Amino acid sequence: MTSKTDLAPITVAHGDGIGPEIMRASLDVLEAAGARLAIEEIKIGKEVYESGHSSGIADSSWESLRRTKVFFKGPITTPQGGGYKSLNVTVRKSLGLFANVRPTVAYSPYVKSLHPGMDVLIVRENEEDLYAGIEHRQTQDVVQCLKLVSRPGIERICRYAFEVARTTGRKKVSCFSKDNIMKLTDGLFHKVFDEIAAEYPDIENDHWIIDIGAAKLAAEPHRFDVIVTSNLYGDIISDIASEVSGSVGMGPSSNIGASCAMFEAVHGSAPDIAGQDLANPSGLLLAGVMMLNHLGQFDIAETVQNAWLRTIEDGVHTGDIEHPSPDARKVGTKAFAEAVIKRLGQKPQQLPAVSFEGGVEPISIPDLIPQAPQNKKLVGVDMFVESRDTPSHIAHRLIQQTNDACGLSMISNRGVKVWPNGFPETFCTDHWRCRFMSGLDTDFSGTDIAGLLGRLADAGVEVVKTENLYQFDKEAGYSMVQGQ
């Protein structure tokens, strides 16, 4: 008999939509298999949002998460509009869950797949990028979303991807980015990836532009083994990978940090089928297997996954799965879980059985390598101006307020240069980036920027945002515009 002291504390949230159904089914299987868990239940998501917690989670729930350090989470619904933030993103960032690991495996021929041999591991950066959700409406016509990445964040996720590959015996790590367009942000991701890859000569590496990489992942997944990428790209390609492997409903996910971890299905809350006993619990159940391995309960993890494989092999499936056998039996959420429970202790006969004997080697959380300080110099400022005037008239008004410390060098609209020497065919909105640069022999300072802002304000120029322009070791820390 297992004593209470042997139980691993975890926090469980059933979630929204199909969440309660698939969580109940998953927990039934884990409990029947003998999982040694001390469960603390919390409420998150839609009900909590609507009760007045704009974050979607109460303080008492945070206390549970920080105490147990393991979160088994059902899918949740983030209300649209109203300023609500994604709770998934909030939890990942607040608990430092920097690595999102999403395995994608094809179970052909028992689950219809265009790629029977598919076995790809996606390692997604979990805390940065556009998912910071930093957005502003700056003019009547224009809103912005800031894409923020950091060298430490990129270094950590790239090292983790190579450590995952080495620990699990995988042979190659591929980086996906869009550095042909976003030369600073995605350019940094690619650059740091190359630096880290050089430290792992035993593992192959390559780089793909995200658009063709995603296309090849859908059409030729055998090209890939481990993929590491930034937050948004990782979210998109993991759904693509899950769907082409057989069903997005079968995709599990782990979110790993230095002290906490969260386990969830890849898919969302699917409110359109909630309460109808139709949902596939496989993604969340397999996330539970990942959780058991994280907790060191390798025997139970092995038992559950092999029973699940045998269930799939025997033709028991939910409605989202196409099974080729004429004897296959389509069932609901609850009946699927019961079928898995019935097969606990069995192994698949055709699909490869899993073995966690001896445990699963933990993935080390990599240390960051300190960077040498760089010489940082302020050389100019981009001022974003709201106006419905023409580029030449805007330039005339701005030039009147400049002095020898900084001069107007260009104006762009939506990233395209429109002054000087712009084209009349270029479509423009009411949002103009006006670049002021210091003179060649002039020291530039924040005081100069403040003075220019004051003069522009006195002249009735509406400045909605500024961005300082810096050089780092004499290398420009800002992008050129299209047309320069």
Image: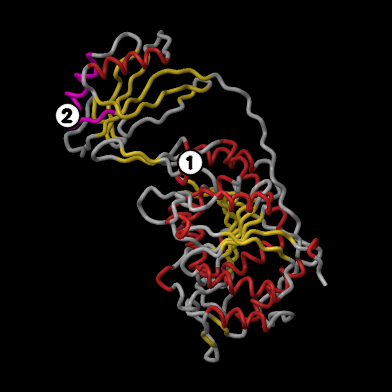
Which of the 4 quarters of the picture holds residue 31? Answer: bottom right
Q: In this view, does 434 lie above or below 129?
A: above
Report which residue position mark 1 lands on: 186
Amino acid, disc 2: Thr
Q: SS at mark 2?
A: loop
Q: In this view, does 273 lie above or below 119?
A: below
Disc 2 residue crowd, few under 14, some 14–19, many 20+, Cα 10 Å: few
Q: SS at mark 1?
A: helix
Where residue 20 appears, as percent x and y from the top left, is: 53, 69
Q: Is residue 397 covered in magenta? A: yes
| Residue 364 visible at all | yes
Q: In this view, does 308 lie above or below 358?
A: below
| Left or right: residue 300 compared with residue 404 | right
Amino acid, disc 1: Asp
Where residue 312 appears, as percent x and y from the top left, is: 60, 80
Q: Which of marks 1 and 2 is in front?
A: 2
- Disc number for residue 445: none
Label 1 and label 2: CA atoms lie apart by 33 Å
User: In the image, what residue occupies the spot 32% across and 8% down?
Assistant: 404
Q: In which quarter of the image is the N terminus?
A: bottom right
Q: Quadrant of the C terminus?
A: top left
User: In the image, what residue occupies the spot 59% across and 74% down?
Assistant: 25
Where residue 309 appears, as percent x and y from the top left, is: 64, 77
Nearest to the observer: residue 249 or residue 208: 249
Q: Is residue 452 covered in magenta? A: no
- Disc number for residue 390: 2
Q: What stretch is highlighted in magenta?
A: 385-400
| Left or right: residue 199 compared with residue 443 | right
